[in-house]
């Protein structure tokens, strides 16, 4: 069996590695001409995602460990905390490079400059046509081509696209700010606007925040506005909030700038011999901290289903049954978190510790403790 994997970001290589582990030949086709070295901001890989990456053979000693998360208000009062197995905070480019090196080591073909324009399905397989006029045939095709997936639209021309969450995201570093923290703790501050931060081993504070903006903007449109203008706007929005005031006063650059987007429920994950994986099917808001982790999980589950169920449409249907309830539950909770990121009132601030100790902590722990048993047989 041969699989054509469309998309060479994070989900695509993980899918190809999982399929190879399942005994299925896979080739990856990426639309962009060059590798994504140095592209992207920081992302979090949760314990469940790290477990999935280890299944496909990736060493997960990258980035920095985060063992606990602390929620606080803009006066420094703790609202709640969650502790558990460590997540890893990593530059997307570093994770991408590790996956690229692993696919190379396992002799998985990766081709760049292959922008998908059409897929023809027939009884015995699929044929993909690319913008350069070339074609490739296989037994099945996996759309791992992100939140603006071409494969999703080919499967279902009426499929929804990503939705703007009403928030723009920013990140940077601040040194000599007077803000301190435990390097293995990530802090989430809910005040005039949301801000998250953690301490680097050298004492520098890495931070990220969200600014409520009703009208959507693309990352390219945001990049056209000078950094100084954005920083001034953020300083005005946060006012005297702490530690945002200190961090913004000691920051002069911005990284990872872009809108927060998420996918609504996608009605069709598969058709004939085509199927979706990762953000193309389920992209929760970055509020979830689970985007990359859920993509890795789905890649592993798809490979297990194809390994154990030889009828491809049945394997796809089983894969969707295993994944949809979990990913849509996480996406729904992330959407509720986005509403809090616009600033919380005094009543919500009083109730948040109780919520964290009950519903929030249980859901968070359940999400992170999820593990896939690769060796277990998948039944229809």
Image: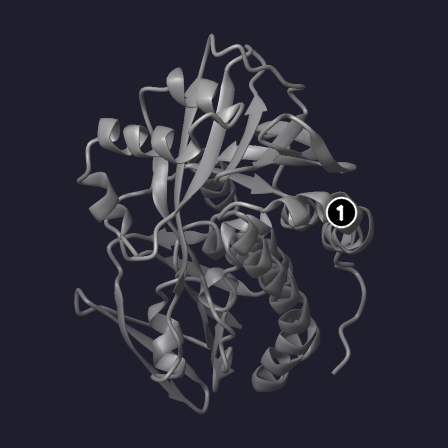
Q: Which residue lies furthest to the top in this view?
A: 176
295 on left or right of 47: left
From the top left corner, tell me how far across and down residue 171 is, in percent: 41, 32
Residue at 59% in and 59% down: 336
Q: In which quarter of the image is the C terminus?
A: bottom right
Residue at 48% in and 48% down: 342
In which quarter of the view is residue 251 placed? top left
From the top left corner, tell me how far across and down residue 96 is, in percent: 45, 41
Looking at the picture, tell me which residue is in the foreground, 212 or 7: 212
Q: Is residue 275 above or below residue 290?
A: below
Residue occupied by mark 1: 356
By what rule are the colours in the image chosen? one colour
120 on left or right of 272: left
Local crowd size for mark 1, using a 10 Å CA cut-off: few (<14), some (14–19), many (≥20): some
From the top left corner, tell me how far across and down residue 19 is, in percent: 57, 61
375 on left or right of 25: right
């Amino acid at each position: 069996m041969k699989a054509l994997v469309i998309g060479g970001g994070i989900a695509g290589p993980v899918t190809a590695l999982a399929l190879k582990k399942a005994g299925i030949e896979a080739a990856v086709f990426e639309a962009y001409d060059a590798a994504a070295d140095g592209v992207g901001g920081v992302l979090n890989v949760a314990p469940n995602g790290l477990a999935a990456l280890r299944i496909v053979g990736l060493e997960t000693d990258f980035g920095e460990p985060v063992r606990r998360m602390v929620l606080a208000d803009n006066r420094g009062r703790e609202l709640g905390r969650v502790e558990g197995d460590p997540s890893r905070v990593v530059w997307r480019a570093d994770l991408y490079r590790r996956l690229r090196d692993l696919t190379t080591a396992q002799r998985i073909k990766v081709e760049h400059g292959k922008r998908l324009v059409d897929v023809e399905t027939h009884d015995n397989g699929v044929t993909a046509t690319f913008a350069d006029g070339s074609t490739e045939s296989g037994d099945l095709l996996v759309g791992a081509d992100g939140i603006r997936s071409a494969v999703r639209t080919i499967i279902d021309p009426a499929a929804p696209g990503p939705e703007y969450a009403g928030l723009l995201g920013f990140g940077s570093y601040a040194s000599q700010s007077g803000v301190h923290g435990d390097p293995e703790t990530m802090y989430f501050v809910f005040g005039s606007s949301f801000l998250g931060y953690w301490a680097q081993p050298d004492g520098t504070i890495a931070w990220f925040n969200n600014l409520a903006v009703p009208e959507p903007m693309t990352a390219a449109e945001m990049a056209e506005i000078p950094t100084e203008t954005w920083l001034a706007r953020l300083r005005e929005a946060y006012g005297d909030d702490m530690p945002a005031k200190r961090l913004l006063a000691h920051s002069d650059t911005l990284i990872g700038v872009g809108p927060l987007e998420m996918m609504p429920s996608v009605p069709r994950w598969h058709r004939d011999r085509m199927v979706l994986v990762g953000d193309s099917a389920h992209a929760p808001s970055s509020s979830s901290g689970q985007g990359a982790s859920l993509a890795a999980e789905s890649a592993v589950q798809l490979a297990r289903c194809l390994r154990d169920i030889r009828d491809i449409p049945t394997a796809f249907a089983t894969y969707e049954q295993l994944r949809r309830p979990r990913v849509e539950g996480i996406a729904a909770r992330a959407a509720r978190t986005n509403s809090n990121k616009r600033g919380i009132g005094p009543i919500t601030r009083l109730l948040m510790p109780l919520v964290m100790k009950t519903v929030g902590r249980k859901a968070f722990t359940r999400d992170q403790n999820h593990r896939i048993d690769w060796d277990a047989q998948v039944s229809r």
